[in-house]
Structure formats: structure tokens, C-alpha cells
Amino acid sequence: MAAAAVDSAMEVVPALAEEAAPEAAGLSCLVNLPGEVLEYILCSGALTAADIGRVSSTCRRLRELCQSSGKVWKEQFRVRWPSLMKHYSPTDYVNWLEEYKVRQKAGLEARKIVASFSKRFFSEHVPCNGFSDIENLEGPEIFFEDELVCILNMEGRKALTWKYYAKKILYYLRQQKILNNLKAFLQQPDDYESYLEGAIYIDQYCNPLSDISLKDIQAQIDSIVELVCKTLRGINSRHPSLAFKAGESSMIMEIELQSQVLDAMNYVLYDQLKFKGNRMDYYNALNLYMHQVLIRRTGIPISMSLLYLTIARQLGVPLEPVNFPSHFLLRWCQGAEGATLDIFDYIYIDAFGKGKQLTVKECEYLIGQHVTAALYGVVNVKKVLQRMVGNLLSLGKREGIDQSYQLLRDSLDLYLAMYPDQVQLLLLQARLYFHLGIWPEKSFCLVLKVLDILQHIQTLDPGQHGAVGYLVQHTLEHIERKKEEVGVEVKLRSHEKHRDVCYSIGLIMKHKRYGYNCVIYGWDPTCMMGHEWIRNMNVHSLPHGHHQPFYNVLVEDGSCRYAAQGL
């Protein structure tokens, strides 16, 4: 029996070898291919990251081809997260496998936090300390933001609750970063004259979900400069501006040469590209955002002037901004260098009015009043940004009462970042919190923030004692009311006013539109969420809008949602 067992075992070994031979032969053929061909196969897009991990563990040659800093893992990263590639320089050494792991981990963490938000804040505003988990995240912030963008870009109207909180988190993260960048920018010396950069920070802060960068805006302006140079070449083929390289800050001193540049600019901007002042829709915030000015080719005096100023300076014409009342202007010096100049030694340019060149008298005629010489003076970057934000602030006050006053809140943040001791704006900010009624159920951090604002106002201007006293009293009364609200509201389905509520707590349901399973753990006779939530969730498009019962449901994926009865 022992001999027979040995014989049978000996028979099995050749059989296994014969079965493995084709696989070994196939692997041998594969690894014998040229390196470029193997790399092309591995980068073809047919293999997942897990596949690449398995391939790299088969033999030394494939392991070398799949090295962590090589093309294979770079392609895996690019295919999975293409929008992140702009953050890497082609000349930098990057461990792509490690980057892939870190990005994957950040994505899982982002989804975990978004899910936790849906549980904690589904029935209230996110309090000011609600983002503390995000601030303590490890790893690159751009990876976390990219995952939030992926959630926002999920197909159709899937996962609306996740999208709602992903949008809030992304809004907060980007605004905090932009505000810090703006504050650092404002610390630059007075002779730092990057007007465009400051305008872009304002644009970014008010549009944090849009992909706006100084690099992209500058590239668009550079393309306009190229068109101007082409036109200028037809006027004067030896013009010194044509020899300028990108990034140079040389200035042309001859008035005639400067005039040729301005003529070429006016032709390209207003005749060829059809830029114009927006007289039909003047009071629209889009007119102040530089990326929108370039897209829509229209704006108001200050935004059109900044575009005109940037192009002119790149071509060597030293225009300067003038904070003229009611109509922002640029000035162009006509006097000799080093001479004592007054307001009559300048020509004033109206970029809103197709680059029209004005005298002092024509400037006064433009606004219909006589002004002092001081108002024809040049202003620095901070004053220009102050005027831009002031315009946004005025527009924010025009928002309807059913809105979230987001523009007003954003413009107040920007203004107070520049001028933190503006008493009237601090009072407006405090009143805005009261008006919006953002009082979190489990945290008084916002109440305390309002009290801090009021105390700061009192320190700055004791004359505001009456207004501050009223708001402080109102705040303290709110705190006392919240302390008294310890009881739980009891809602009975049997009550006459709740007769439209069809489903009770504990029922397991399936959503008709989105197909998820859930259990009901609360209900309201009508939608109790704020205007912002109703607008973001497009509740008005439902057959009965927000005038129908809404249910608090726990979904099978662990998230909490607020669903309309009609769905």
C-alpha cells in the first residue's frame, strides 16, 4: 500500500506541472515583451489599482515596471483623479503609489465626515463649531476637497443629503483658505500693486465652489494681450511693447507710443471682442467677478477698469486707478517725468465707456457734479478692493427676505477682514445673525460670537451703547429661553392638524424615486427646514412643495435624511 501511495503521488506531480506549464509559459511570454509594450499594456486603463498590485508581485521585471514613482502608478492616479494632476509639476519627483494611498484614505475620511453631518445636523443649521472635525484632518486638504467635489458631481439627483452637506463643507474649507490668503495679501507693502490678484481673491471668496485661479485668469488676459500685440504690429511694427516678454514690467515713457497701445487695446476689447459696460443689468453681482467679466465680456466701471489697467500695464502703459465718485476711472499722465503735476496734467479713461478719454470737465459732466481735486488722486490696492467689496455689500442688502443673505454675509466677512474695527458693519453682522435665526440646539457658540462682536463694538465706540445694549439683552433672553426649553414636543398623529400624516414612526419604507430602504423615526406636518435647504433640495419642484408632511428617516447606509411624503 505504501508503494502504491508513492507511485500515485509521483503521478500527480507531473500532472500539476503540466497544468501550470501554460500559465508559466504565458507569464514568460509577457515578461519577454519590450519594456515600452509592457508599460503600454499596464497603462491601458483596463487594469485597476488592485490588478497593478497583483501584477507587481509576480516577478522582478514587472515589479520594476510598477515602481511607485513610475508611469504605471502615475497613470492609475491620473485616471482615478484627473482634476488633481494640475497640482503636480512635471519636473517634481512624486511617489505615485504613496499619493494614491493618501488620496484613497482622504476620500474615505471625507465620506465618513459627510455621513456624520447628515446624522448630526439634518434638522438644524451647522453650528460654528460643527467643522472642528474637518480642521483636524490629516493629509493634503486638496485631496479632501477633491472627494467632496466627486460627491457633488454624482449622477443626477442621487444622494441629495450627502451633496447638501458636501457643498457646505467645501464652501467652508475654501472660504477659510481664501480669507487667510487675502489677509496675507493685505499685509503686502503699499507699493505692491497687484490689483488683479486682490480682485481674484474677492471673486474666489464669493464663488468658492467655482474653479477660479489667478493662473487661469491671467492666461485669458494674456490671450487678449496677444491680440492687442497683433493689432499693434499693424500700427507700428517696431513698437517696443512687441518685444516685451511675459512677466516683464517695463514701462514706455513716450506718450505717442503709449497712445498707440491704447488705440490697439480699444479696438481689440470693444470692437473685436465686443466688451462693453453692463448698463442693462448694472446691479448684478456677476459684474464684479473677474472670471465672469471675461466670460460675459461685460461689467461695471471698477471691474472693466481693472481689466483695462492690467492689459495696459503688461504692454508698458503706466495707467493708475482713480476712486472717482459714482464712476471708477483710470488716469493717464501727459506731463513730463519729474515735473510738478496737477489734475489737468492727466487724461482720464472710462473703461466702462469703451475706453473714452476724458478731461477734468468731462469727468464732472459724467457724474453731473463738481468734485474736489483730491477725488482725482490715485488709490492703492486696498482702497480699490474696499470699493469692490462695498459694491457687493450694497448688492447684498438688496437680497430678498426669502434668501440666505449669502452675498451679504460674504461681503461683510471680506470688508471686516480689511477693516476689522468698522462699528456699523459689526452691528450689521450682529443683526444679521439675529435675522437669520441661526441658533443651534446643542451649542451656544454662535450666541457667544455675537456677544463678542457686541463687546468689541462697545470698546470701539461707547456711543453705540443703546444699540449694543438692546442686542445684548436680546441675546441673553434667547439663552434663557433655550435653557427653559427642556421638554420634548409631543406630536400626535390623531390630532386634527396632523391628519395629512400617513405614516408612523417605526415603519420600514422604500423611497419611490431613489429606491433606498429606511425606517421612520420622526415626522413634521410640513417641511421645517430653512429656506437655504428648501432651495438647495429643489423642494418647490415637488407636487405639493414644502406644504406636505416630511419624515426623518434612517437609511440603510447609515445616513439620516428628510424625505417628503409624496416621494
Image: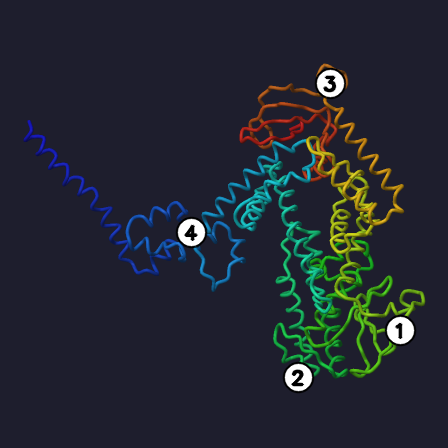
**x and y percent of residue 346 in the render?**
83, 76
As helix, strand or loop, the secondary structure at mark 3 comes to: loop
Question: Residue under circle 1?
Answer: 360
Q: Real-space Cα distance between discs 3 and 1? A: 73 Å
Of the residues under marks 3 and 1, which one precedes in the sequence?
Answer: 1
Mark linked to residue 237? 2
Q: Disc 1 or 4, which lies upstream in sequence?
A: 4
Query: What's under tag 4, amino acid-wise?
Result: Leu
Label 4 neighbourhood size at 10 Å, few (<14), some (14-19), many (20+)?
many
**Foreground: 442 or 60?**
442
Could you tell whether 417 is left or right of 329 in the image?
Answer: left
Residue under pointer 4: 97
Residue 39 sits in quarter: bottom left
Q: Position of residue 214 (x, y in %)?
A: 64, 61
Q: Secondary structure at mark 4?
A: helix
Q: Earlier in the sequence, mark 2 or mark 4?
A: 4
Residue 499 circle label: 3
Bin the neighbour count of mark 3 within 10 Å (Cα to Cα): few under 14, some 14-19, many 20 and up.
Answer: few
